[in-house]
């Protein structure tokens, strides 16, 4: 589980890099798709896992990821919506 969480953390860092550089919607979509895949794998592992609790390390990692996601959401989401709306008018 921790390995999947670390993968998710790395993907979130890549999203932050995209935000800090020239924002490219295609890169955003690609990384976002990878994040969705990783989340689906985590969810699948969770459903197949018989343990009913998370270790303290896992809980701490979840908290860290939630904070990172909230920060990225406030920074990136407005840009993504703006670019997506412009792309609809160009087609």
Image (spheres, rainbow, N blue to C red):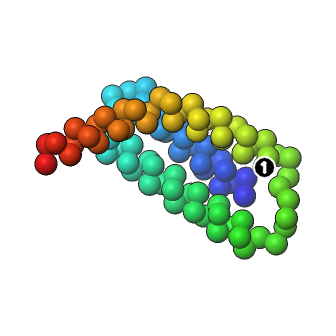
Which residue is at a point 49% across and 39% down the rendered structure image?
Answer: 14
Which residue is at a point 58% across and 39% down the rendered structure image?
Answer: 69
Q: Label 1 neighbourhood size at 10 Å, few (<14), some (14-19), many (20+)?
A: some
Q: Secondary structure at mark 1?
A: helix
Q: Position of residue 9 (x, y in %)?
A: 61, 43
Q: Is residue 26 left or right of residue 44?
A: left
Q: Quadrant of residue 63?
A: top right
Which residue is at a point 38% across and 48% down the rendered structure image?
Answer: 29
Depicted 1 relative to depicted 78: above or below: below
> Which quarter of the rendered picture does the N terminus lie within?
bottom right
Q: Is residue 27 left or right of residue 34?
A: left
Front-lying residue, 7 or 32: 32
Judging by the rendered image, the residue that carries numbered circle 1 is 58
Front-lying residue, 1 or 59: 59
From this viewpoint, which residue is outermost toward the left?
91
* Residue 86 visible in image: yes
Q: Is residue 1 left or right of residue 16?
A: right
Q: Is residue 27 left or right of residue 55?
A: left
Depicted 20 relative to depicted 86: above or below: above
* Residue 24 visible in image: no
Depicted 59 relative to depicted 70: above or below: below
Q: Position of residue 34 (x, y in %)?
A: 48, 54
Which residue is at a point 13% across and 48% down the rendered structure image?
Answer: 91
Q: Position of residue 78 (x, y in %)?
A: 40, 32
């Amino acid at each position: 589980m921790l390995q999947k969480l670390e993968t998710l953390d790395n993907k979130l860092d890549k999203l932050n890099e995209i935000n800090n550089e020239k924002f490219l919607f295609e890169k955003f979509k690609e990384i976002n798709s990878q994040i969705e895949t990783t989340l689906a794998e985590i969810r699948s592992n969770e459903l197949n896992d018989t343990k009913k609790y998370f270790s303290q390390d896992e809980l701490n990692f979840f908290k860290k990821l939630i904070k990172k996601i909230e920060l990225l959401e406030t920074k990136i989401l407005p840009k993504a919506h703006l670019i997506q709306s412009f792309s609809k008018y160009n087609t």
